[in-house]
Image (tube, rainbow, N blue to C red):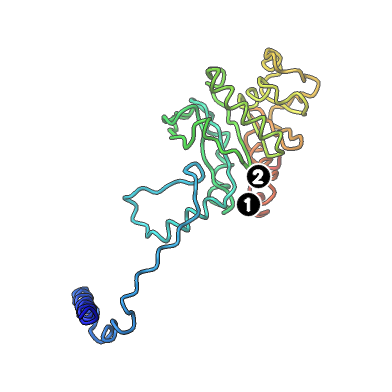
Amino acid sequence: MAALLKENKTQADIAARRATLLEEGIAAGDIADWGQRTKLRRPRPRRQLPHLRASDVTLLTKTDATPPIIRAFQTIKACAMKNITIVIPDHFADWEFSLIAPVLHSYTTNYHVRYAATDLDHKTSMGALRVIPDLTFADIPVENAALILIGGQDWRKLNPADRATLAAHCHKQKTDGNLLAGICDGAWFLAANGLLNDRRHTGNDLEAYRAEAAYHNAAQYQESQREVVRDANLITASAMAAPAFSRAILEALGDIPAEVLAYLPAA
């Protein structure tokens, strides 16, 4: 009796499934022997993607129409890309990274460019460009191919906590041998936090550096208005040297195509 009931239940399940498939527009001939071939096997569990931290990728919203499998590949690709973090203060100098960011974001496939600031409120540049940061200072990735400090009017207004957080990231970046770059008052921030004491460097004004208690390397300051100074993994420049600053960073990364670099002024 039990075997008969089980067989009847199986046949009923097959009939119900056939009816459902027919309602979905699948031809009857395509499912004629569906029950015999499948034997009502349970569906295999879906394979889980590797655990990914939210800070490593830009998550797509639920309203995104991109198919799930494409979103998965985009997520994995983002994790494999090298981080480029561009630090911007409020009233930042928008021209100082206008060549770096487009090349890294649009002309290569190796880098994930993100912007960091004290908070996630929009920042307005000196040219009235509004940018919504991706990261706070606390969320800057531990590993960066380049950490770039852009100039602006509010660097010297940072509160002690934000200043200490960003300085810690900069010291780690330098110690790890990864590229650390500052232009205009971004370079001043490096000087003010003792990051230029063992490297050749430049900037807007040596006297502004000397006014900072943590700066002790006037002997290696190189007076320059339109040139960039690179010493190992550290790059500095004045506000007037933005094109050369961009070129120096792209060359230091080591994998930017020569045909792209050819369009930029020599560092």
Q: Nearer the viewer, residue 102 or 135?
A: 135
Q: Nearer the viewer, residue 146 or 35?
A: 35
Q: Is residue 185 left or right of residue 72?
A: right
Could you tell me how many numbered marks the image carries?
2
What's the distance in space between the residues labelled 1 and 2, CA to CA?
A: 10 Å
Is the C terminus in the top left, top right, bottom left or bottom right quadrant? Answer: top right
Residue 255 vertical position relative to residue 165 in the rendered view, above or below? below
Give the residue pinned by disc 1. 260
Horizontal and vertical percent position of residue 196: 72, 25
Give the residue pinned by disc 2. 250
Which residue: 20% across, 81% down?
Answer: 1
Residue 178 vertical position relative to residue 36 in the rendered view, above or below? above
Q: Nearer the viewer, residue 260 or 13?
A: 13
Q: Is residue 242 visible?
A: yes
Amino acid type at circle 2 is Leu
Amino acid type at circle 1 is Val
Disc 2 crowd rating (10 Å Cα; few below 14, some 14-19, many 20+) is many
Which residue: 67% across, 50% down?
Answer: 262
